[in-house]
Amino acid sequence: MTGPGTLAGGGTPGHAMSEVVLVASGDLRETANRLGWPAQAELERAVEAAFGRHGVRVKRGHPVDANAGHGFISSQRMGMDVFATIDPDMPLVVAEAVWQYSHHVLAGLRRHRGPILSVANWSGQWPGLVGMLNINASLTKMGRAYSSVWSEDLTDDFADRAIAEWLRTGRIVHDTSHVAELDPARLPREAAELGGRLASELAERMAILGVFDEGCMGMYNAIIDDELLNPMGIYKERLSQSALVAEMRRVTDSEARAAYDWLIGRGMKFRFGPDGATELTEPQVLEQLQLYIAAVRIADSFGCDAIGIQYQQGLKDMVPASDLAEGLLNDPDRPPVSHRETGALLYADRPLPHFNEVDEGSAVDALVTNRVWTALGLNPATTLHDLRWGAPYDGQFVWVFEISGAVPPVHLLGGYSGAVSERQPPVYFGLGGGTIKGVSRPGEIVWSRVFIMDGGLHVDIGRGRAIELPAEETERRWQATTSQWPMMHAVLTGVTRDQMMARHRANHIQVAYGDDAASADRALAAKAAMFDAMGVRVHLCGVSQG
């Protein structure tokens, strides 16, 4: 098994650890690279100081570009050219303080022979932790060994010991004792029967994932080949985002207005301003609702069971953000959408699961959740979040799960009346559009992640609670991350911060609610059983069997 704590092909680096090479993968959007560069430069100074304390020099693998205003690798071609100048046997540090496109460095990492260490600063300011987890997941998928370390400034004992271990051995062994393999024979009989039945139904009737342009933001880990999906009964309908824009043009103004009035009637609020360049406007929201209606109609026309809209790149230059639509799609209670010709209601009273950023690991997870939760009589609304950041509060570690889109209002405290739509940050979303901002309601959750490792599909699954924090702490966390986005305060059962970071093989995490602890436990068991019956290898995280 490759991943943190392993080094394929031997246990010692090819060079004496007197010097390491540092690379920094960046965004494809140059505005984002320039904004994030000060944080990245600060991280790199911390890396140099941390290695310097061990007598090791850090050499940058590519220069800072004064004209560009940053020092990131900002394209796949640039990454290939950079790695062509790096000795493939040198110890390599991939430092990330921001979100990055992993395919910028994929070719170089795939061919690199020396030990690889991914490093991120423990900060919510920019999604560097999310970027590092995406690189880790991509390395895991490709079967390339790596190690990781995360720290506020790399001066704490945890980081110092980890770096010393890597410099000495070329690997870091983190504690992942919270992970246990599922023993199907020990599943409750009811869960095993339900999971087996649902897996058989999926294999027989089969399901379609509607994918609006694959490979969002360099997320190599988020693409699952047909050869892994098809035997389970899951197929892709590869759709074009240009078709989505075309379908939006066929949605009438009165249809978009009716959806807007429905949201207002449910108590949802929109923070409008007069300047569309920096503020949310009503026309932006109406266009977002045209996208919502168009997406439902396209999904219906192709018989899709779930859909994923990439949005980045291309679509962001054509229409406002897709986030409002994504959250609505994941809620069974949402503005009705009718067939353009027959008037029949589409996907009435049920979600049309949306997997944000066309993350196909989340797609498979959402599909399974939808069927298990529905069969158990639970609300099947599900979503993914970025594993963004976290901090201790009142004696326990509380994660910040946060994402720009895909969160259904039913997950929020107060539902629609607790939701407010704020304009997406202009630096990423030039044409505007609002989110569904709110705080996730307290309750018992099941979390999971489908990922590729050792050439096959795996799933990590565990339990936790969404909790309510004081308003001032919630606001502090929003200001420390992205204040326009919905957020969950999550406490994970039996999994520490560092165990989660050491094990998690994705930038995204999937969550769904139980009605109470007992129903969440039943749902977890049935979901594990269905995955097992589908041929997905199941890993229980922080929870025990029997």
Image (tube, grey):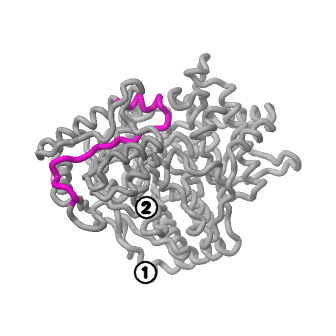
* Labels 1 & 2 near each other (Cβ < 8 A): no
Looking at numbered disc 1 in the image, what kind of residue is underneath it?
A: Arg
Can you give x and y, in whole percent of width and height, for residue 176 in the image?
A: 29, 63
Q: To which residue does mark 2 refer? A: 142
Split into 4 quadrants, where in the image is the C terminus? bottom left
Tag 1's secondary structure? Answer: helix
Classify residue 199 as left or right of residue 161: right
Residue type, label 2:
Met
**Residue found 57% across the figure and 46% down from its top:** 406
Q: Please tell me which residue is depicted at 62% across the width and 67% down the height of the picture.
A: 375
Quadrant assignment, res 500: bottom left
Q: Is residue 301 above or below residue 458?
A: above
Q: Is there any visible trace of residue 134 in the rendered image? A: no
Residue 186 - label:
1
Question: Where residue 468 sits: x, y (%)?
Answer: 41, 43
Whether residue 32 appears in magenta in the rendering, the answer is: yes
Residue 97 drawn at (x, y percent)? 34, 39
Q: Residue at x 20, y 48 (%)?
A: 159
Graded by Cα atoms within 10 Å as few (under 14), some (14 to 19) or many (20 or more), the crowding at tag 1 reads: few
Q: Quadrant of residue 242?
A: top right
**Magenta stretch?**
13-37
